[in-house]
């Protein structure tokens, strides 16, 4: 690790940290197998960078701190879902210190850009691997037919986000060509974010499909964070006597989740054998620790006491605290508006319809998740200290809202892609 020792013996300026060499070392063996001597050097780098941070400050110092936080999670014994997915590097909410949502249009666009870049990056890796143009994660590579399918599903999953950004989906020129065009579009979306994006991919092993797994999970984290913002705004709108605005927020949240459903079809192309290989080293990192997902759930309706008291919410203590502190919900805001006679009939029906549509989409998400998890995991336990799919089966039909009435139009579980 010449580059790192050289950096340590110099001015330890965060701007000159040897990211490519350090990343290359992690990628060579997988984070779980990183050499202890190498990790000790990084630990030293972290101590030195903490000193340098005070003098230099700014983005390079923060980037280095966040990267080392993610890179040293196993070494520190802090490894979990949030550090596995490097949420901090992607500026996605990952703890109690999450910033309040930015202004709507800006936050929505930033999330759409991130979603597109994450998926495009996964496809770029698939294209490079199938062309033998990269040595990264060489084990259990899929064949060209699977790669073509991944390209098709990935492009489909981000087309709505591209449309929201005012960008055309790449013209269909056959799967790999279309995906390559998407990668070109994504490359221009946030050049300053390229380094953090690259740093946010630290697989625990060297199995090819772990790349896809990480990027799809990150993409869903990006979506859930956006949905939580929309639901929070819906609560505020309902409380502030603006039912149409609330309906708009609920509709937007539903579209975010519903139109991205090809993401799960994309994940379902993962080879179960590959998944079982790398998950041996992800123990302790489970999406049961997803702050954004639990925020979505608890902003819809206050969870029942037994759920709040279970591993589900004990895995996200800061969300549990918010609920215990009386976090307002869409369900309660709607019911109190109805109770107080603040909604005329058309508005009441409109909001109820939008709640039902969002609830139906979330239930569908759970069903698809359950199906994919069952196929990949079989009877094995989860990595989040549950018995695995029996846990998922038990929460499958937990009501999203208590208040909304009409049954929504069912969503196609394959995201319109049965092939
Ligand atoms: C190979 C694919 C997947 C498998 C095998 C799987 C498996 C599981 C299992 C077994 C659990 C229960 C907790 C545990 O012990 O780990 C769980 C929970 C969860 N998973 Fe997945 N999962 C997969 C993909 C995903 C994806 C792509 C997401 C998107 C973010 C996701 C989100 C969640 C969430 C939010 C929970 C918590 C649900 C709750 O507490 O009610 N999972 N998953």
Image (cartoon, grey):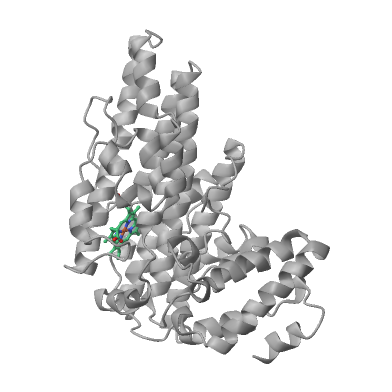
Q: In this rendering, does residue 58 appear at all? A: yes
User: Looking at the picture, how far across and down is residue 254, in whole percent?
Assistant: 37, 38
| Vertical arrangement, residue 379 with respect to residue 363, above or below | below
- Residue 401, image quadrant: top left
Residue, x 71% and y 88% (percent of image)?
Answer: 5
Quarter holding the N terminus?
Answer: bottom right
| Residue at 36 percent of width and 34 percent of height | 300
- The total of numbered circles placed on residues is 0
**Viewer can see residue 160:** no
Left or right, residue 108 beside residue 1 = left
> Ligand 1, what quadrant?
bottom left
- Which image quarter holds the C terminus? bottom left
Front residue of this view, candidates 177 and 18: 18
Q: Quadrant of residue 17?
A: bottom right
Where is residue 359 drawn, in percent x and y? 29, 36
Q: Nearer the viewer, residue 219 or 296?
A: 296
Q: Determine whether 47 is above or below 371 in the image.
A: below
**Nearest the eye: 380 or 360:** 380
Furthest toward the bottom, the residue is 2
Front residue of 233/212: it is 233
Across and down, in percent, residue 33 comes to 45, 85
Identify whether 172 is placed above or below 9: above
In percent of width and height, residue 239 lies at 47, 20
Q: Residue at 21% across / 30% down in the picture?
A: 407
């Amino acid at each position: 690790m010449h580059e790192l020792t050289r950096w340590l013996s110099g001015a330890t300026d965060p701007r000159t940290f040897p990211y490519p060499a350090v990343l290359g070392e992690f990628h060579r063996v997988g984070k779980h197998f990183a050499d202890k001597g190498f990790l000790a050097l990084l630990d030293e780098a972290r101590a030195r960078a903490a000193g340098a941070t005070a003098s230099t400050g700014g983005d390079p110092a923060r980037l280095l701190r966040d990267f080392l936080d993610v890179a040293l999670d196993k070494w520190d014994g802090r490894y979990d879902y949030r550090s596995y997915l490097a949420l901090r590097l992607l500026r996605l909410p990952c703890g109690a210190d999450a910033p309040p949502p930015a202004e709507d249009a800006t936050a929505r666009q930033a999330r759409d850009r991130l979603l597109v870049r994450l998926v495009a990056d996964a496809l770029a890796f698939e294209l490079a691997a199938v062309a033998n143009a990269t040595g990264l994660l060489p084990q259990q590579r899929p064949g060209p037919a699977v790669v073509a399918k991944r390209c098709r599903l990935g492009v489909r999953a981000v087309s709505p986000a591209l449309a929201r950004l005012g960008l055309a989906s790449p013209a269909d020129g056959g799967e790999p060509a279309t995906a390559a065009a998407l990668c070109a579009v994504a490359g221009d979306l946030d050049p300053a974010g390229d380094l953090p994006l690259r740093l946010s991919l630290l697989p625990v092993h060297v199995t090819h499909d772990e790349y896809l797994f990480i990027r799809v999970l990150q993409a869903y984290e990006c979506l859930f964070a956006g949905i939580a913002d929309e639901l929070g705004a819906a609560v505020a709108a309902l409380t502030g006597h603006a039912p149409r605005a609330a309906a708009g927020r609920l509709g937007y949240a539903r579209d975010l989740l519903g139109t991205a459903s090809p993401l799960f079809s994309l994940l379902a192309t993962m080879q179960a054998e590959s998944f079982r290989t790398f998950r041996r080293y992800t123990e302790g990192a489970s999406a049961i620790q997803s702050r954004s997902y639990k925020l979505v759930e608890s902003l819809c309706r206050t969870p029942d006491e037994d759920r709040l008291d279970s591993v589900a919410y004990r895995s996200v203590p800061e969300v549990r605290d918010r609920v215990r502190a009386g976090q307002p919900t869409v369900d309660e805001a709607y019911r109190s508006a109805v109770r107080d006679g603040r909604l005329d009939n058309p508005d009441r029906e409109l909001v109820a319809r939008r709640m039902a549509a969002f609830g139906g989409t979330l239930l569908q998400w759970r069903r698809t998740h359950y199906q994919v998890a069952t196929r990949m995991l079989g009877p094995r336990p989860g990595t989040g200290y549950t018995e695995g799919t029996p846990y998922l089966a038990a929460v499958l039909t937990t009501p999203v809202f208590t208040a909304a009435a009409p049954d929504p139009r069912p969503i196609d579980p394959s995201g319109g892609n049965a092939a």
